Amino acid sequence: MINEQQVRELVGQLQDPFLHRTLQETGGIIEVSIKEEKEHVSVKLAIAKINNAEQMQLQMKVVDLLKEAGAKTVGIRFEELPAEKLEEFRGTATAAETQDLLSPLNNVQFISIASGKGGVGKSTVSVNLAVALARLGKKVGLIDADIYGFSVPDMMGIQKNPVVRGNSIIPVERFGVKVISMGFFVDQNAPVVWRGPMLGKVLDQFFRDVEWGDLDYLLLDLPPGTGDVALDVHQMLPHSKEVIVTTPHPTAAFVAARAGAMAIKTDHEILGVVENMSWFESKKTGEREYVFGEGGGPKLADELRTELLGQIPLGQPDWNEEDFAPSVYHEDHPTGQLYDEIARKVIDKETTDKPAENEGPVSPFDPRNQ
């Protein structure tokens, strides 16, 4: 029967699927247990990212390897390598490893823009936050991950399609933001009638096959709610922060709490809340009318134990036929200045805050309350 030392030597030769270094180099073999009478071997392994297809492939390799060496049955448990361990390898990562967006060694900051329901202006917030970050000198990408309800190309007034170069897709750049969307690959605004697994493959291509270059931030305009596509995105990303969009209406804020609970459940940090359509301001009198009520955004931020990043009034940008972008607020527009303030808060939180855990019961939808 194989002994513990042999198990460590054999399994230690296999590579962490994300770090591309052996488990011996990463210290990924946490525990080995052998029951000789049952010819059973149990191993506990730590890898850079768990609960994915790469983990399953590694699991099969470990089982095959140990059975070939004499074990009759094999048990495997996985956990994630601690953050400080990943930092050690990030400093020695190759260019190829750091350019893989889904690698834990990549320094790009993912920001997912989510909402509990449609119609609250989530895509408008995604587009304008991306443009505002670019105005502040950041290198920004934007994925329109709302596969069924894609709208980003039209909102930004994008008239051209991405270029395919070899095996890579070159994203379209507009207002300093690199953009990719399902809208680029659908003819005449046709509906998308694919099932979940096919959509997951498209999202994987958006991450792996698009030549994003060097980015500071990659924003994702998620579909509303907590369906398959949103869950796929949460599980794909090695790390992400999330902005929750709501309107002032109590029901919209109540439903948006579900999106916040999903972020918590998938170990993503909630960056803050943006309240959209907060009021309508009359150009003649300057008076504010609270068309959708008041208080939804602050209440949601309080429930999620996070910050209210900003409140955006009901309105529309100024545009002209030469520079048509029907949803983009420019920096000299009062609402554009509000988006710049939100972008500064995002940058400040990234540079000053340590990743914080969302502690305690934060809403009735928090899975930890069950």
Image: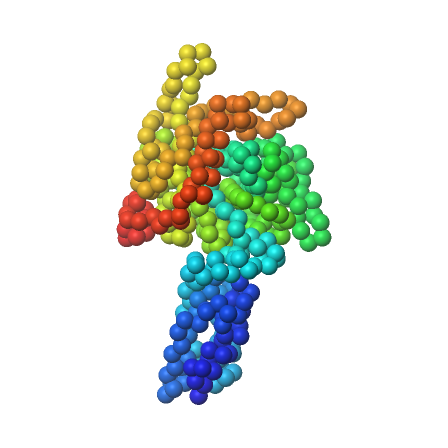
Note whether residue 251 is visible. no
Question: Which residue lies most toward the right here?
Answer: 166
Colour basis? rainbow
Question: Residue shown at 45%/31% (left/top)?
Answer: 341
Q: Position of residue 112 (x, y in %)?
A: 47, 44
In the picture, residue 327 is in which quadrant?
top right
Residue placed at 46% from the left, 35% from the top? 344
User: Does 288 sit above or below residue 206?
Assistant: above
Examine the rendered structure and indicate whether residue 369 appears above or below residue 299: below
Q: Taking 323 as reference, is 286 above or below it?
A: above
Expressed as whole percent of the image width and height from the top left, the position of residue 366 reads: 32, 48
Quarter assignment of residue 320:
top right
Please state which of residues 29 and 163 is positioned toward the viewer in this rendering.
Answer: 29
**Residue 191: percent from the left, percent from the top?**
57, 41
Residue at the top extreme, as displayed:
284
The relative height of residue 130 versus residue 74 in the rendered view (above or below) is above
Provide residue 285's location: percent of width, then percent of height. 41, 11
Q: Identify the residue at image location x=41%, y=32%.
A: 310
Q: Number of callouts in the render?
A: 0
Which image quarter holds the N terminus? bottom left
Which quadrant would residue 260 be assigned to in this image? top left
Inspect this view and state whether residue 234 appears.
yes
Q: Residue at x 52, y 23 (%)?
A: 333
Residue 33 in the figure: left or right of residue 173: left
